[in-house]
Image (cartoon, grey):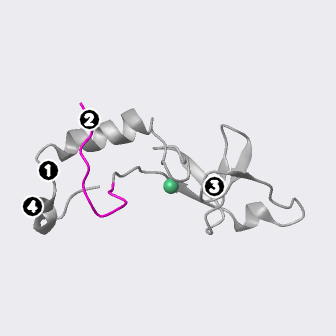
Amino acid sequence: MPIWPEHRFFYPIDWRELSMAIRFGRAQGRCESCGRPHGQMVYHLGDGRWWDAEAGSWRDGWGRRIRVRSGTDILGRASRTRIALAAAHQDHVFKRLKR
Ligand SMILES: [Zn+2]
């Protein structure tokens, strides 16, 4: 995700490398909150639930496997989104990776 010019001052000079190390090193290309894979088209229900094609199961917004009732029209409700990982600080404080 590009940095807005007016926010550039808040990021460390090596943010690009730091972001890459977090997204594809530590997180191994998956969201650390929900487990969605970077760059993949993922079916979701718009409420946090998404289809993990690799595992062959639905997951909730925290990445836990869940069951979705088969009687409902799931495919009629599902949307597809391409996942793009972004690095962010969750506690509003930048933390440097140990090297
Ligand atoms: Zn996520």
- For the residue pair 62 and 37, the one nearer the viewer reads as 62
The image quadrant that residue 56 belongs to is top right
Q: Which residue is mark 2?
A: 98
x%, y% of residue 21? 31, 36
Q: Residue at x 66, y 60 (%)?
A: 49
| Magenta stretch secondary structure, dominant | loop
Q: Which residue is mark 3?
A: 43
Label at residue 12: 1
Q: Is residue 41 above or below residue 4?
A: above
**The magenta segment:** 88-99
For the N terminus, the image quarter is bottom left
Q: Is residue 5 above or below residue 36?
A: below
Quick check: 81 left or right of 94?
right
- For disc 1, the neighbor class at 10 Å (few under 14, some 14 to 19, many from 20) is few
- Mark with earlier residue (2, 3): 3
Q: Residue at x 81, y 66 (%)?
A: 73
- Mark with earlier residue (2, 4): 4
The image quadrant that residue 43 belongs to is bottom right
